[in-house]
Amino acid sequence: MDLAKSKVGDRAVYQPGASSVEGLPTILQMFYSHPLPMAKPHWHAQVEVNYIVRGTVHYHIGDHELHLKAGEICLFWGGQPHQLDELSDDAIYAGAHLPLVHFFRMRLPLDISSRLIRGQTLISSATDAADDENFARWHRYAMSGDRTKAEHAVAELLLRLERIAFEPYRMVPEKQENLTNEQVHPQSSRSLARMCDFIAANFLHDIDTVDIAKAADLHPKYAMNLFKKSTGMTLGKYVNLLRLSRAQAMLMRDGANVLQVAMDSGFGSISAFNKSFRHIAGMTPSDFRRDMRVLSAMNVEAIKPSMRRPAPQFHR
């Protein structure tokens, strides 16, 4: 991933980037790196997978927080604002950002997928040395430029994540909902994937529920109910999340104009953009742009020596 760096005091921090997860909300990306703390929460319309290879990390995710240590794996819905705010000096994590089209192709019990999309985090300690090797290899394959290798890495990753349901895991926070422990029907899963495929290709255009349902050969009401039952959110909210994720990254560009960002992100008006952005970020797009530019400018001279040093290489 392309990680923009800034300094807060003597600490480099993560910022949204046009070629990173926020700017490419429909692309599956894998990572294997020393994470950067976040100065502010961010969001993206993918399910995030984190495997802690070494060290510890601490997250604020939605309405809860969690501390993860080496050998633990977690999954959570990135559409809720989340922030990695603390980590050990030796921390290395690996994982991926899964667009919903990939997430719905997994054969996870409905109990897991529904709780994830509704804001809970899945944590499992049922890992072993093979995960260290596999996550490193999947990242190498994904970054190799070889399409066949990249597809193989994705297929193996999804199978590994499906195996989580066969081993001990916990959901946090431990709120209980009346969800059945069934799997999504294969036909329903295919319909969800087709809807997500269409949304991914067209979210920057003026689309509505009728368009989305037609792409999946479904009645609009059935499409709305199926998506809401499976994800806990409406089709409109998911489309908005994709647009907001892209807008978040675009606001970081030099000379970004809020009105132009709104139009280029698929919003029909500046008022609709401001309302949606404030709802998820707690501030206006203009305030977000200002705050992130201040972070970028702070101590920029101090970081130049560290940026000239070769990036650490992780060999597995």
Image: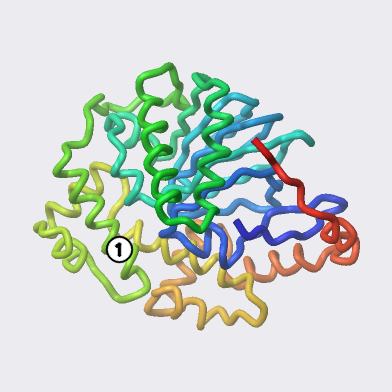
What is the basis of the colouring in this image?
A: rainbow
x then y, percent, for residue 237? 35, 58
Identity, as a three-letter code, of the amino acid under mark 1: Ile
x then y, percent, for residue 153? 44, 43
- Find residue 178 and report its image quarter: top left
In the displayed structure, does residue 225 sit left or right of residue 266?
left
Of residues 298 and 169, which is closer to you in this image? 169
SS under mark 1:
helix
- Find residue 1 and report its image quarter: bottom right
Q: Which residue is mark 1?
A: 199
Of residues 273 and 166, which is closer to you in this image? 166
Total count of labels: 1
x then y, percent, for residue 216? 16, 58
Q: Is residue 272 above or below residue 146?
A: below
Among all residues in the image, which is located at the extreme top?
Answer: 168
The residue at 50%/45% (across/down) is 96
In the displayed structure, does residue 220 sit left or right of residue 229?
left
Q: Is residue 149 above or below residue 24?
A: above
- Find residue 230 and report its image quarter: top left
The residue at 41%/59% (across/down) is 26
Bin the neighbour count of mark 1 within 10 Å (Cα to Cα): few under 14, some 14-19, many 20 and up: many
Of residues 311 and 268, which is closer to you in this image? 311
x then y, percent, for residue 49? 50, 39
Looking at the rendering, in which quadrant would you find the C terminus? top right
The residue at 51%/83% (across/down) is 260
Q: Is residue 67 above or below residue 193?
A: above
